[in-house]
Image (cartoon, rainbow, N blue to C red):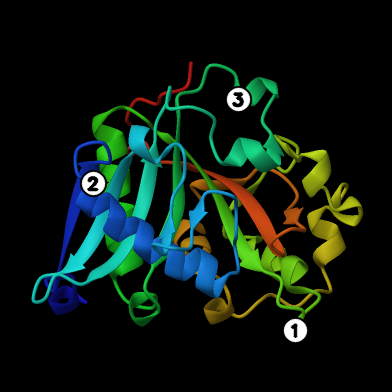
Amino acid sequence: MGSELMSFEVARFAASDDLEALRRCQRLRYRVYCEELGFDPPDMDHVRRLDVQANDPVCDLLMVTRKDDGELAGTIRIQGPGAGPYYAEDEFVLDGAWWQGRQLVEGARFAVSPAYRDGVVPLLLFRAFRDGCRERRLTDLVSVVLIPDTGQDPQIPLRALRWLIGRVELEMDRARPRPGYLYAPFASLSPADLADVPPAADRSLPPMLRMLATPRSTLCSPPAYCRKFGTWNFLLVTDLAPRGGLRSAP
């Protein structure tokens, strides 16, 4: 892994300061979210093949590129406090006591080129994201991980949940899917209901979910279902604080 790590470099930039870099990231996001996953929100720019979002200009982005030819291998957007609504709030209600006063940071639009998904690129993005958040004392990372509903495995959300048991903390009453994203059979789902469900295979799950599946992450809600794009969406909060360090909670 060491030699592979040395083949890439990571850069962080404010979207408002580097339009060219932003366009490169939006182009990769278009390939992943539009061409692979079929997303087509109103602000998707099909003419220029860019995934453009209204809150991009007020966020920072990370990009991982190859050192030899500059190819963009992966990107993620960093949205801190005060930069507008989080993507998670579109699909989940975050109104319980646990959320009050917290300085959340959201990692969104995680996109890695297919050639690099099983290598070090996801790890490089996460490490850079974590280190930057720690510098700003932002220690509660909120993420929505998308699993496409391809129709090939009707049990995929249950198998993904079964895979998460024992890997993350389960506090599925911290939040709830918004009415348009609620899948009623999952509203009162508990780990006991999954005892006979075989877990998903590691490689069938998104790199972001595999990366966040640690004891420092908490699954905060039953999965939401996006009917428009056909995805199962998992809400996780990850504790980024150094061991023994100060947290951003009130």
**Residue at 32%, 64% in the rendered image:** 74
| Residue type beneath disc 1 | Gln
As helix, strand or loop, the secondary structure at mark 1 comes to: loop
Disc 1 packing (10 Å; few <14; some 14–19; many ≥20):
few
> Where does residue 147 sit, x and y in percent of width and height?
63, 66
Label 3: state its secondary structure: helix
Which mark sits nearer the N-terminus, 1 or 3?
A: 3
Residue 244, position as x, y percentages in the image: 34, 32
Q: Disc 1 vs disc 3: which is toward the camera? A: 1
Residues at badges 2 and 3 in contact (C-beta under 8 Å)? no
Q: From the viewer's perspective, tell me whether residue 148 is left or right of residue 140.
A: right
The picture places residue 35, in percent across and down from the top left corner, at 52, 73
> In the displayed structure, would residue 168 be above or below residue 49?
above
Residue located farthest toward the left when viewing the structure as drawn: 68
* Mark 1 in CB contact with mark 3 (< 8 angstroms): no
Residue type (three-letter) at the residue carrying disc 2: Leu
Residue 42 screen position, x and y as percent: 59, 50
Report whether 112 appears left or right of 205.
Answer: left
Q: Which of marks 2 and 3 is in front?
A: 2
Residue 83, image quadrant: top left
Q: Which residue corresponds to the image point at 86% horizontal and 47% vertical from the top-left?
A: 187
Residue at horizontal 26 percent and vertical 36 percent from the top:
16
Q: How far apart are marks 1 and 3 (CA)?
A: 36 Å
Nearest the camera: 168 or 37?
37
Q: In the image, which disc is placed on residue 152?
A: 1
Q: Mark 2 points at which residue?
A: 19
Q: Quick one: label 3, few (<14), some, or many (20+) residues within 10 Å?
A: some
Three-letter residue code for mark 3: Trp
Residue with the mark numbered 3: 99
Looking at the image, can residue 214 be seen? no
